[in-house]
Image (cartoon, rainbow, N blue to C red):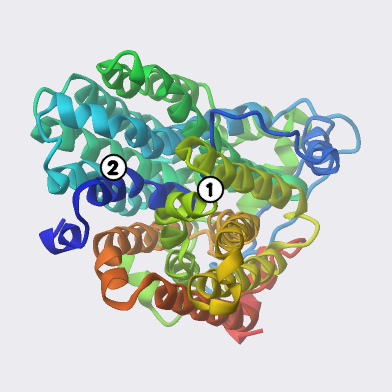
């Protein structure tokens, strides 16, 4: 990082920023969770609604979105989802393989969260306790690697398939964790974090991609949102893993080392998981596609689904899309929507809220960092669970509009709590309320929806690379914000910055209202046509 970023803070403030900079990443993925307190159970109605959807997957309401090329000049990229429903109980199942894929989400959250508690102790052990810049690079190396990994993941998924890419992804995840755990120098530590970042960057692209391609249409939204819940679980695991640090300062090595275990389990699990039938048919591997369909949806669906996928024209008329195809007139509008959603997600201020959450809570008399993280995390987990239950009811667009609208109001409240003299007596309380409402609003839509929505709006020919490009924008913007955020706050003041974020949220509402189409219950062809026509 540039030294000017850290010149803005002195002493403990500089160190506090470094310890909290990781939160900008984990909350930006709607992923913050907590430890150290007991959470009240989530509303039973939310869990029952989600549970009912998941139960239908086991009870035979299975379907596969088949892809149907338009005749004529469409080129085979506009798709139609054709849900196929079983009359009775299906002999196939999807849930175990979604669970295996979500090991990637757990590792995503764990690698983001593990440095929070460990940074102070590893800095002392490696002799950089007084070097805020090197501590910053240990944190930020993960982001740099994730940017590379997110772009790489799309190409790997297209070339080797989804399950093989998961297995390849386990290599940097495991090696990176091992290097961090055994590092005797800051250089080795940074290399380990960089490799782990490459791994979570790939995971961020292929976990939602794989889940969307194997999930039954009726529960695609619920299963896609489960990805976010598993990220929360990963961060929770990282926070719990840090509890012994006070008694054993060298425990930080164990914290990094245990991440090798789920990496190995991911590689092994994907060896037994079916490949995406869509990708197999695209590659002309019909025999393997039949086997995958039998595993996922039952043997009674094999003939029907293979016929539909084969007749759809996937992989028969056009070569694989290249990176430059994403910027062609044919695809650019839909690709720009994906990139814009992640840019709005990052530019809407999630980093700022979390950077300052601890100081905000202290102003209200909450001195415990654990309690502050718990309050933020509980809001995030609760919001994500509610979003999972509403995704297939309210729809993706409605949740995005509600989310960004709530974030705008929360940012306005936060800004006023710092500057409006009439509210001075209540400033601490209002700041806490604004922070919690903001995180809750974020987790309802801006956090979980983009990663779910993108595989739905992208045509099959460009899906993997377009998802990777959009997530690359996420990681790049995340890195830049982490690099320059404190300098901007020092120059303009946090209240003005919050007000600017409120403006970004309003712009996001306007953009989503005019450019994002609802995908709930709509065929892929309807989605593509709506985006093309600007509906």
Instruction: Using the rendered image of the protein, determine whether residue 293 is visible from the camera's viewpoint.
Output: yes
Report the residue at 43% width, 29% height from top: 238
**Residue 27's spot in the image, x, y percent?**
48, 50
Q: Nearer the viewer, mark 2 or mark 1?
A: 1
Q: Is residue 230 left or right of residue 48?
A: left
Would you place residue 343 above or below residue 433 in this image? Answer: below
Distance between the Cα atoms at labels 2 and 1? Answer: 40 Å
Q: Between residues 357 and 50, which one lies in front from this camera angle?
A: 357
Residue position marked by numbered label 1 in the rendering: 365
Q: Say which mark, if any, is on residue 198.
A: 2
Q: Secondary structure at mark 1?
A: loop
**Residue 417's spot in the image, x, y percent?**
54, 70
Report the residue at 14% width, 49% height from top: 133
Would you place residue 317 above or below residue 206 in this image? Answer: below
**Residue 285's spot in the image, x, y percent?**
50, 40
Q: Is residue 280 left or right of residue 121?
A: right
**Residue 271's spot in the image, x, y percent?**
46, 22
Q: Secondary structure at mark 2?
A: helix
Q: Between residues 387 and 459, which one lies in front from this camera angle?
A: 387
Locate the C terminus by quadrant. bottom right
Q: Between residues 56 and 425, which one lies in front from this camera angle?
A: 425
């Amino acid at each position: 990082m540039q030294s000017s970023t850290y010149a803005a803070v002195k002493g403990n403030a500089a160190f506090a920023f470094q310890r909290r900079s990781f939160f900008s990443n984990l909350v930006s993925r709607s992923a913050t969770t907590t430890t150290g307190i007991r959470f009240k159970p989530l509303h039973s109605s939310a869990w029952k609604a989600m549970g009912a959807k998941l139960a239908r997957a086991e009870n035979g309401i299975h379907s596969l979105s088949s892809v149907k090329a338009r005749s004529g000049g469409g080129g085979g990229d506009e798709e139609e989802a054709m849900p196929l429903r079983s009359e009775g109980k299906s002999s196939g199942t999807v849930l175990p393989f979604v669970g295996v894929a979500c090991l990637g989400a757990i590792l995503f959250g764990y690698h983001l969260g593990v440095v929070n508690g460990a940074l102070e102790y590893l800095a002392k052990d490696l002799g950089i306790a007084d070097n805020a810049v090197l501590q910053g690079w240990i944190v930020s190396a993960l982001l740099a690697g994730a940017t590379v990994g997110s772009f790489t993941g799309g190409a790997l998924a297209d070339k080797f398939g989804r399950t093989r890419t998961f297995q390849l992804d386990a290599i940097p995840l495991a090696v990176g964790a091992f290097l961090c755990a055994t590092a005797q120098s800051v250089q080795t530590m940074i290399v380990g974090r960089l490799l782990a970042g490459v791994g979570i960057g790939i995971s961020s692209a292929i976990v939602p991609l794989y889940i969307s391609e194997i999930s039954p249409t009726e529960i695609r939204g619920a299963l896609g949102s489960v990805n976010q819940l598993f990220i929360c679980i990963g961060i929770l695991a990282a926070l719990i893993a840090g509890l012994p640090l006070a008694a054993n300062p060298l425990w930080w090595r164990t914290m990094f080392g245990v991440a090798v275990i789920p990496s190995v389990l991911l590689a092994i699990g994907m060896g037994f998981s079916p490949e995406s039938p869509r990708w197999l048919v695209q590659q002309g591997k019909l025999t393997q596609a039949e086997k995958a369909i039998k595993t996922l949806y039952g043997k009674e669906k094999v003939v029907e689904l293979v016929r539909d996928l084969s007749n759809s024209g996937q992989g028969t008329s056009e070569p694989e899309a290249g990176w430059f195809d994403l910027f062609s007139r044919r695809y650019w509008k839909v690709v720009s929507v994906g990139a814009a959603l992640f840019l709005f997600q990052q530019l809407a201020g999630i980093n700022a809220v979390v950077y300052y959450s601890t100081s905000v809570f202290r102003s209200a008399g909450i001195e415990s960092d654990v309690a502050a993280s718990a309050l933020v995390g509980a809001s995030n987990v609760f919001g994500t669970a509610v979003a999972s239950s509403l995704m297939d009811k309210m729809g993706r667009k409605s949740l995005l509009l509600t989310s960004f609208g709530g974030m705008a109001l929360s940012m306005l409240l936060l800004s006023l709590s710092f500057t409006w003299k009439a509210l001075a007596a209540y400033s601490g309380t209002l700041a806490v309320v604004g922070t919690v409402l903001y995180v809750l609003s974020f987790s309802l839509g801006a956090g979980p929806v983009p990663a779910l929505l993108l595989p739905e709006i992208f045509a099959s020919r460009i899906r993997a690379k377009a998802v990777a490009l959009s997530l690359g924008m996420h990681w790049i913007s995340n890195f830049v914000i982490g690099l320059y955020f404190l300098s901007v706050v020092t120059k303009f003041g946090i209240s003005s910055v919050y007000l600017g974020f409120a403006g970004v949220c309003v712009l996001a509402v306007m953009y989503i209202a005019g450019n994002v189409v609802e995908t709930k219950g709509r065929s892929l062809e309807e989605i593509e046509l709506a985006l093309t026509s600007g509906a």
